[in-house]
Image (tube, helix red, strand yellow):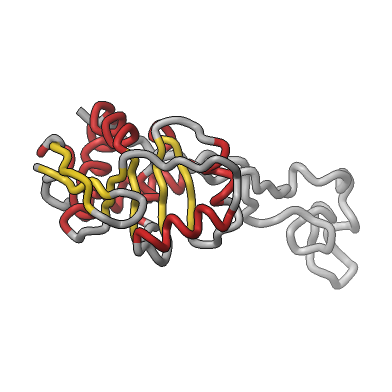
Amino acid sequence: MELAVVKLDGSTDSRLSVADNVFSVDFKEPLVHQVVTAYLSGGRAGTSSQKNRSDVRGGGSKPWRQKGTGRARAGTIRSPLFRGGGRTFPSSNRSYAQKVNRKMYRSAVCSILSELARQDRLWVCDEIQIDEPKTARMANILAQLGLAGRTLVVTGDYHPHVTLASRNLVNVAVLEAAELDPVSLVGSETVLFTTEALRKVEESLQ
């Protein structure tokens, strides 16, 4: 399979040959859904915690005698029925992590990349060169390429000027090839790879 390589002015420069088992596979929606859900679940803190009746301080003695008061029997004022008592079904610390095999994860990413390529939402350019971290410069490059909406820019390595120039653009995100994740790919309307980044991603998925 070949992908068109564009220049920063929007013209087509050349074509790049890529692996079919990465950029030309069937779209597996159930697998993509499972991997994206697992990725989002892994980012949850799971630190919500409440106290049950045994964790609340006090309530060691019976508040009143069992019979003769006319009130309902009670064993502790830290019962969930009383103000200041414990919760009936309290939340506790837990992990939301879901196990996803490495093969499943790679297959899902390949499926997403292939679907982006089929829909002409995957772009490749030689290199993004910015001499200084100016937002207007990055906005001008994206405008010349005709990219609008939520755009993900994937670079081979960390480029401080590209990252800083894109930080104030609302619909633009910049990631290194090693940090690429399925949630960022699914949530972007257009994904712009540099040639170096595309080769690194291709190598990591094979």
Name the image quarter holding the C terminus: top left
Q: Quadrant of residue 45?
A: top right
x then y, percent, for residue 113: 24, 47
x then y, percent, for residue 127: 37, 39
**Number of on-image labels:** 0
Q: Nearer the viewer, residue 143 or 27?
A: 143
- Against 85, is 19 above or below? above
Q: Quadrant of residue 197?
A: top left
What residue do we see at 68% from left, 46% from top? Answer: 49
Q: Is residue 162 left or right of residue 61?
A: left
Residue at the bottom extreme, as displayed:
70
Q: Quadrant of residue 131?
A: top right
Name the image quarter holding the N terminus: top left
What residue do we see at 36% from left, 51% from top? Answer: 8
x then y, percent, for residue 50: 70, 49
x then y, percent, for residue 77: 84, 56
Q: Is residue 200 left or right of residue 82?
A: left
Q: Nearer the viewer, residue 41 or 150?
A: 150
Q: Nearer the viewer, residue 17 or 23?
A: 17
What residue do we see at 60% from left, 56% from top? Answer: 168
- Against 86, is 14 above or below? above
What residue do we see at 55% from left, 62% from top? Answer: 170
